[in-house]
Image (cartoon, grey):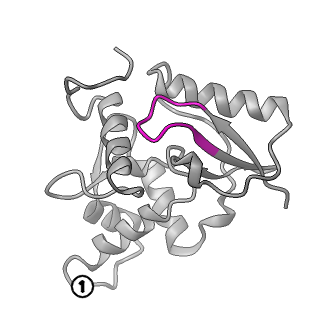
Amino acid sequence: MTISWITVDTPLPSGPMRVAVTPRGVVAACYLADDAGPRSEPCTDPAKIDAVTGRITEYLAGERRTLDLPIDWSRAGGPHGSVLAALLAAVPYGQTITYGELAARSGVFEDITEPGVAARAVGQMMAANPVPLLVPCHRVVAADGLGGFGGGRVGIEVKRWLLTLEGVLEPTLDWNGPG
């Protein structure tokens, strides 16, 4: 299947996003555009470019609460896909869920009884989310704070920025998002 890439300028601390599309939908998204996927095969479909760029730009400007872009789930099957689908269905804009709560809600970890194992597994699944922002892994937090986010310090700042945009966190003095 042909994958092509779209670069979307964003106000995020990580800079532009790179979004990979197939005929079925968005198959991958990366916050750190410098590290994101192959440099070949730029998307040349104006409708896809307009849809992806427009919706992400509107979302990050606070003008929309859902992206409503089709997702190509081919990179997230089995338990991982089930957890991501549970997140997408259960946690709307402006809300959060803990890693442990998402583990329980997904139904994937019913046979695991050791404390914390399911929550840690969900954390690893969020780190491997192929379509962040579309499947909002930034809304999954630790029971005692923000938790982690891919990309190290810049990744945590992206998570903090998105949760501030959605009203989960109060803006700080250095907030550069929509007013």
Residue closest to the far front: 34
Which residue corresponds to the image point at 29% horizontal and 45% vertical from the top-left? 96
Q: Is residue 164 left or right of residue 106?
A: left
The question of residue 70 being in magenta is answered with no
Q: Which residue occupies 70% across, 30% down?
A: 51
Residue type at mark 1?
Answer: Thr
Residue on which disc 1 sits: 113
- The image position of residue 1, as x and y in percent, is 85, 61
**Furthest residue to the left?**
144
Whether 67 is drawn above or below 77: the answer is above
Pick the front one: 37 or 26: 37
Q: Is residue 173 above or below residue 143?
A: above
Numbered-mark total: 1
Determine the image quadrant of residue 123.
bottom left
Q: Is residue 170 above or below residue 136?
A: above
170 vs 112, nearest the viewer: 170
